Amino acid sequence: MWKQENTVYADEGMTPEGHGSIRSRPVSSETVSAFIGTGVTFKGVITYSGTVRIDGSLDGEIHADGGLLVGAEAVITAKVSAGSVVCEGAITGDIQATERITLRAPAVIQGSLKTPVLSIEEGVRLNGTLEMTAPVVVQQEPSRESKLYPVGPSGRPLVKRVDE
């Protein structure tokens, strides 16, 4: 049930061996922190850091700062908040992502979505509302870069620099 050594993939499978139906390029360099397999039913609140893959049934809430991968066989009835969500299964409830939501066929979503980036593949059914938020911007300290000034053919500045 718990896996920690697999790389998370969004297109060809969860692992290099191709397990699961979420396919091709890595979602992130993180590994799957937890895995709820097909046939497993979970009721309650899940809170985690990292990435979780759900292929079974979940009824409750999901709170994460990492990724949530929902397989094609998954049935989730929950309020979801995560960094990123990649879904091929069924989710009934509100989904909020700080980074992005990716919906892949044959996903069925019943509820509201709130995210800065949304990707929907043909064949997905979405019944609900959508709110596009501004992306989270990391504030950087101002750098002390040198300013560029025009120079003439002799290589001498054409204008007098103020900072001299």
Image (spheres, rainbow, N blue to C red):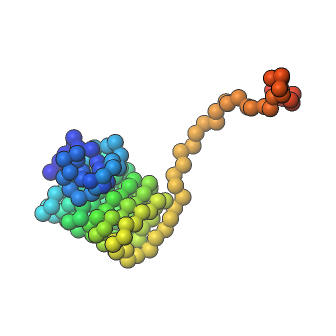
Q: Is residue 84 above or below residue 90?
A: above
Question: Camera-side residue: 86 or 2?
Answer: 86
Residue 44: x %, y % from top left: 23, 62
- Residue lying furthest front: 153
Please give the name of the residue rendered at 19% of the width and 52% of the height, measured from the top-left corner: 19
- Which residue is most to the bottom? 127
- In the displayed structure, 93 sits above or below 30; it is below
Residue 105, picture quadrant: bottom left
Q: On the picture, is 60 further left or further right than 129? A: left
Q: Is residue 3 left or right of residue 50?
A: left
Direction from residue 118 to residue 77 in the image, left or right: left
Left or right of 101, for residue 47: left
Query: Is residue 156 placed above or below 67 in the rendered structure?
Result: above
* Residue 75 visible, this orientation: yes
Q: Position of residue 144 (x, y in %)?
A: 67, 30
Q: Residue at x 81, y 28 (%)?
A: 151
The answer to whether residue 33 is seen in the rendering is: no
| Relative image position of residue 29 (x, y in whole percent) | 34, 42
Please state, as top left, top right, bottom left or bottom right, where the C terminus lies in the image.
Answer: top right
Labels in figure, total = 0
Tell me which residue sits at (52%, 55%) in the image. 135
Closest to the observer: 50 or 153? 153
Q: Residue furthest left?
A: 39
* Residue at the image point whose x is 41% and y is 71% from the top: 112
Q: Position of residue 99 (x, y in %)?
A: 44, 54
Indicate the quadrant where residue 73 lies. bottom left
